[in-house]
Structures are given as C-alpha cells and as structure tokens.
Image (spheres, rainbow, N blue to C red):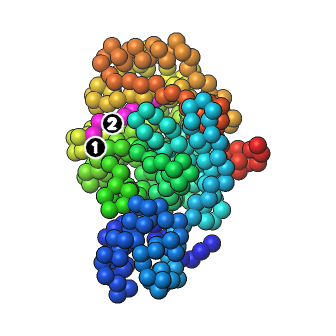
Amino acid sequence: MSEKADIRSYTYDELCHLITDMGQKPFRAAQIFEWLHGRSAVDISDMTNLSKELRSRLSQEYVIAGLKPVKKLVSGIDGTRKYLHALNDGNIIETVLLRYDYGNSICISSQVGCRMGCRFCASTTGGLVRNLTAGEMAGQVYSVEADIGEKISHVVVMGSGEPLDNYDNFTRFVDIITDPRGKGLSGRNITASTCGIVPRIRELADRKYSFTLALSLHAVSDEKRKEIMPVASSYPLEQVLDACRYYFDMTGRRITLEYSLIEGFNDTKEDGERLAVIASGLKAHVNLIPVNPIEERKYRATGLQGIAQIKNILEKNRINVTIRREMGRDINGACGQLRRSFITGEENA
Ligand code: SAH
C-alpha cells in the first residue's frame, strides 16, 4: 500500500495551506481542487494546467487514492447499478446508483464493514475493518459519474458503515463535496443515515450542517430496539429523539425516520400508533422499509397488508410516509449483500 497521503481528502483550505507551504501561489490550490472535485481527475499527471515540475513534486508526496470498479451489475428493470469498488489496500466496498426522475442518486459506503451490530444488517456481520477516508467517499461519486458519463445530483450515505462512527472523515467528505469550488453539491441533496449516536447528532446540529439526517428507528420502545440494535443500550430512545429534535431546531431540516418492518416483531397496530406519536413529535417524515432478509438471520419482511396498515395509521395522523421501493430486484444484493457474497466467495457470476 502506498505511504503517500491522499490529496483528495483535503478540504479547500487545507489544500491552500499545503500548496503555499510548497512555495506555490494560492490559485494553484484552486486549480488542483477543481481537478479533484470538479473534473474528477484520477491521477495527478492529468492536471495539465499545472507545470510538469509541480505535478511531479506533488506526485512524490501525494496520490489520488484509487477506487477500482471490480464488479458492476446493471438492472434491466430500472437501471439501478451496483458496484464493488476495490480500494488501494485491496478492501472491497459497495456503491449503488439509483436512477430517479429527478436525477441520479448514489448510495455510498462510509466504512469497510461496520461495528454497530444491528441484527438484521449484512454489513456488520464481519465487524468493522476500517474507516473510509473523505477521499474514498467522494471517489465513489466520481467513479460512478465517470462510468455513466452523467452527473450525480443526490448522495445518500446509507451503504455499509455508520457515518457518525467515522465522524471526522464523514464531515470532511460533506465539506468537500458541497464546496462550490469543486463538485458543489447542495447540502439539501445529501442524506446521511445514522443508528443514533447522540453526541454526534448534537455536534452536527451545533455545526449547522444542512443535509437531511435519517434516523434508523426500527422499533418504538427501548426494550425492542435493544433486541435488534446494540447501540440502543448506549443511547436510550428518549435521548436519541431529543437529539433529533435539536438537529431540526438548529438546522431547520426535517428528520427522516427509517423503520424496517420485520414480520411479527415491530408491525402491530400499536407499533404503528406509537410510531405516529414519535413522528408527529419530531415533525418527521417516515420511510417504511420491508426488511431484506439476510442469510445469517431468520427475519422476514412484513406482508403487504401489514405494511398498508402501518402506512394508514401514519397517514391518518398526517405523517408524511413513503415505502421504500425495492430497486434493482433482478441484481439482488440489497444492503451490503453483494459485497458480502463477493468476499465470502459465493459470488462468482
Ligand atoms: N449505519 C447507518 C446506515 C446503515 S444502512 C444506519 O444505521 O442508519 C441504511 C439503512 O438500511 C438503515 O436504516 C439500516 O438500518 C437499514 N438496513 C440495513 N440492513 C437492512 C435490511 N436487511 N433490511 C432493511 N433495512 C436494512
């Protein structure tokens, strides 16, 4: 593995310092930042408006950490594309492109694996391998843009990993990708999902980030939540919801509550009613997700009637609710399952 630093992980200001420390004019930093985040350069030698000498000096100390697409599956139904990217150290991560009427949306990973241990999630079964750098998060966006020859307008941080367990790199990623001198993505077009790490939610609020925060709720009592989400033992629901309220108050951004429906576990009428109370209190939007069964566990998704019942209860209470559509049904591998089957050797198509 290369010892050189990943130049794509620096914010604009950091890049300015780095460049002026090399005795260069600050406008060089603007050029480099634009190459990295506006023009998706994959190699320092591509930066043709820099002198050869500067390019070679930069190359001695820095790299653009590579992401190599090692597998790509394209859905014949809805154009969804699932990618496995190999990182410089050989680790594999999953990235998904979703095509909507309003534009191209990408679901990126924030860590290799995850240590949160949610019982229904395939990304956590092998534990946390390592954090992704900001450059590796941004690189997923640029790699897919290069593959489709189109721009990506929306980013959701809902792939493998817990972004708030990789807080510094994640916030650095948001700072970089929203910087108008590079990709310039609107914060409003970014959604990040968390299992509920309270102090970090508060910190994001204090820093007034403007992206949409999605909370993985999945159960309406602490008792139940603890059964499927170990993080619930550290942060009781009351504290998590308080932090979400604080995020909304500070940023004006409505929270999304994610609720994975597991048959016979969290899908009764009472669950729906309690969910409506929680969502009303937060003025939150609810996203219902029929659970994707994973091999390691025997959870099954709530049936259509059960889903409709919860949806109706929420709608009666004037809650804005959506049911997550399953995209790319024919290319399988929801929520980290493609990566999992690849690294365990089952994926040999
Ligand atoms: N660590 C973040 C991002 C995880 S993935 C978080 O916990 O929010 C994004 C969403 O997919 C989360 O709500 C997660 O709980 C959910 N998810 C993971 N595995 C799932 C599965 N098998 N079925 C349905 N939803 C799942």
Q: On residue 312, which mark appears?
A: none
Q: Is residue 230 above or below residue 18?
A: above
N-terminal-most mark, 2 or 1: 1
Q: Nearer the viewer, residue 139 or 34?
A: 34
Q: Magenta stretch?
A: 253-259
Residue 255 within the magenta-colored segment of the rendering: yes
Q: Do the residues bearing badges 2 and 1 touch, measured as CB atoms within 8 Å?
A: yes
Answer yes or no: disc 1 within 8 Å of ligand 1. Answer: no
Give the Cα distance between marks 2 and 1: 8 Å
Observer able to see residue 196: no
Identify the image quadrant of residue 82: top right
Task: Please give the name of the residue rendered at 44% of the width and 65% of the height, measured from the top-left corner.
Answer: 36
Q: Residues within 10 Å of mark 2 (few under 14, many from 20)?
A: many
**Residue identifier under label 1:** 247
Q: Is residue 108 left or right of residue 183?
A: right
Q: Name the kind of residue labelled 1 in the image.
A: Tyr
Q: Is residue 281 left or right of residue 7?
A: left
Image coordinates of residue 201 in percent, x first then y, are 34, 47
Task: Please give the name of the residue rendered at 45% of the width and 13% of the height, measured from the top-left corner.
Answer: 309
Q: Which image quadrant: the N terminus?
A: bottom right
Task: Please give the name of the residue rendered at 57% of the width and 64% of the height, measured from the top-left corner.
Answer: 66
Q: Name the kind of residue labelled 2 in the image.
A: Ile
Q: Which image quadrant: the C terminus?
A: top right
**Residue identifier under label 2:** 255
Observer able to see residue 190: yes
Image coordinates of residue 196 in percent, x first then y, are 41, 43
